[in-house]
Image (cartoon, rainbow, N blue to C red):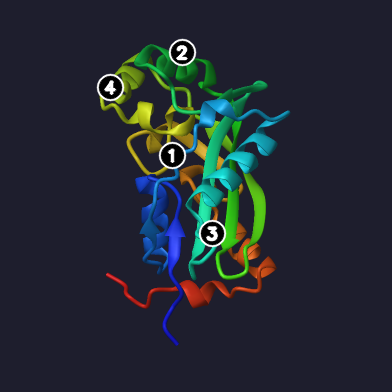
Amino acid sequence: MAPRTLVLASGSAARLRLLRDAGFDPEVVVSGVDEEAVSAPDTPALVTTLAERKAAAVADEDGGSVVVGCDSLLEFEGRRHGKPASVDEARSWLRSMRGRSGTLFTGHSVIDEPTGRQASGVAATTVRFAVTTDAELDAYLATGEALEVAGAFTLDGRSAPFIDGVDGDPGNVIGLSLPLLRSLLGRLDIPITDLWSGLRA
């Protein structure tokens, strides 16, 4: 039996890399959802709603694929941090987080196109930030990476040495929780192994 097609409703290179490394070969379709137009009472609800809208925007009611939508935000001292709007904003965030902890929330939503069924959930990982120097932060900010990731940091790039550790799924911080994806697929009666591409590098 040929594997079913997995569609990632995200332009995130990190999410695509996570899925490929885990044995999937997803098709990428960027949803185009206006994230600024969505509101919710708390961070878990917001990332879940955004993930649901991204998946729904890409899903085809006549299709045969499995669509996955995700959205990530860092919550630090009650404030939500997505991608910083500028280097100055990223610098301010990173300075304030030195030696402290925040929680990275990623909403996940899966749609089974043939049935139209949808399952959603959110993963939360505590991130413990190192005490970095101003020189380290300036060097990191000069790479441009901070402007491309939620909270201005990631575990799979230049900022990795500046994270003392995480409590929870590290993949969630990178952008997608594979254990949660398996759980959501299970709710839709789709074995995660049915989505493996069988093609490994």
Question: In the rendered image of this protein, does residue 106 appear above or below residue 188?
Answer: above
Residue at (54% x, 71% y) in the render: 192
Residue tagged 1: 32
Q: Position of residue 186 (x, y in %)?
A: 65, 69
Closer to the camera in the image, 52 or 83: 52
Classed neighbour count for the residue bearing mark 1: other residues with Cα under 10 Å, few (<14), some (14–19), many (≥20): few
Residue extending farthest front: 62
Question: In the rendered image of this protein, does residue 89 appear above or below residue 100?
Answer: above
Residue tagged 2: 92
Mark 1 or 2: the one toward you: 1
Q: Of marks 3 and 1, which one's residue comes earlier in the chain?
A: 1
Residue tagged 4: 139
Q: Of marks 4 and 3, which one's residue comes earlier in the chain?
A: 4
Disc 4 to disc 2, C-alpha distance: 15 Å
Whether residue 170 can be seen here: no
Residue tagged 3: 178
Mark 3 or 1: the one toward you: 1
Mark 1 or 4: the one toward you: 1
Classed neighbour count for the residue bearing mark 4: other residues with Cα under 10 Å, few (<14), some (14–19), many (≥20): few
Disc 2 marks a residue whose amino acid type is: Ser
Residue at (40% x, 69% y) in the render: 23
